Image (spheres, rainbow, N blue to C red):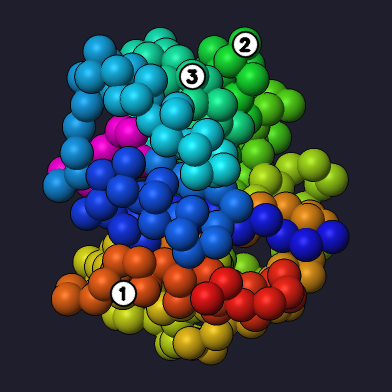
Amino acid sequence: MPHPLSLAHLSLIASPPEDLIRIAALAGFDLVDLRLSPATPTDRAYDDKERISLCRALLPLLQGNGLAVWDVEIIRLGDDTDPERHLPLMEAASLLGARRLKVVCDSDDPAQAATLLARLAELAAPFGLTLDLEYMIFSGVKSLGAALAVSRAAAQSNLKVLVDALHWMRAGDSMADIRAAPAGSLGYVQLCDGPLQAPWGHDALIREARTDRRAPGDGEFPLKDLLDVMPEGCVASVEVPLRPGDDPLMHARHLHEAARRITDLGENAS
């Protein structure tokens, strides 16, 4: 079964949602991921009323371009996070028809993280949303094993673990780790490429993740092998930030073509 392709908002983070949707459609993507809550201090922040108004305006644009929203991001969990504060983001995601909501955990306390994730998942369930926990070696949940353990402790059927190729490589996870994951515990995969050798230092790792990823096939990651051990037909979201001075549409088309070669989805998009 082929992997549907989604364009992650980080790939064109300077583009507002309406432009991202148009570009994703022109580049041939099946789906799009939208950042409607800030992941970094430089991201656009919407108040609740503004976000809902935006989502209502995006609906005809999505329909007109034959595109669906896969993932809305992001919820950052800290020890003092109030899960109920994220209900407006869940409402916005549901309005768009999104299927997933991405979560990053900044808490270093696995028990507290599991408690917060469980409550978030309970709140998301009536909206028909699945939560995807993304692990990163510079977050509170640093590896696939740690993410699976927290997810298991939270014990919610609509909580999955997201495998980002970059974080999977930098955490030192293996194909065997993914094969050993309990059935139904993994959600989808984010595709990018890079060198086998990780940059040195905490700040350099963050910088690589946010600005210095490579298109699939332009690095040394074993992406085809990774896809082989992920759930059959799972969505592959392509997350490779645009380099300064590059054209957004050309970048998106390159990412689509590169991902199609990796996922064997058929002819190139261009």
Q: Position of residue 202 (x, y in %)?
A: 27, 66
**Residue at screen point 60% across, 25% down:** 129
Label 3 Cα neighbours within 10 Å, binned few <14 / some 14-19 / many ≥20: some
Is 226 drawn above or below residue 139 in the view shown?
Answer: below
Tell me the kind of residue under disc 3: Leu
The label shown at residue 126 is: 2
Measure the C-alpha gap from mark 3 to mark 1: 33 Å
Residue of label 1? 212
Is 103 drawn above or below residue 245 in the view shown?
Answer: above
Q: Secondary structure at mark 1?
A: loop
Is residue 106 visible in the rendered image? The answer is: no
Q: Position of residue 3 (x, y in %)?
A: 72, 60
Q: Position of residue 56 (x, y in %)?
A: 38, 20
Q: Secondary structure at mark 3?
A: helix
Q: Earlier in the sequence, mark 3 or mark 2?
A: 3
Foreground residue, 70 or 212?
A: 70
Range covered by the magenta-colored residues = 35-41
Foreground residue, 109 or 134?
A: 134
Residue of label 3? 95
Is 242 drawn above or below residue 199 in the view shown?
Answer: above
Is residue 31 visible in the rendered image? The answer is: yes
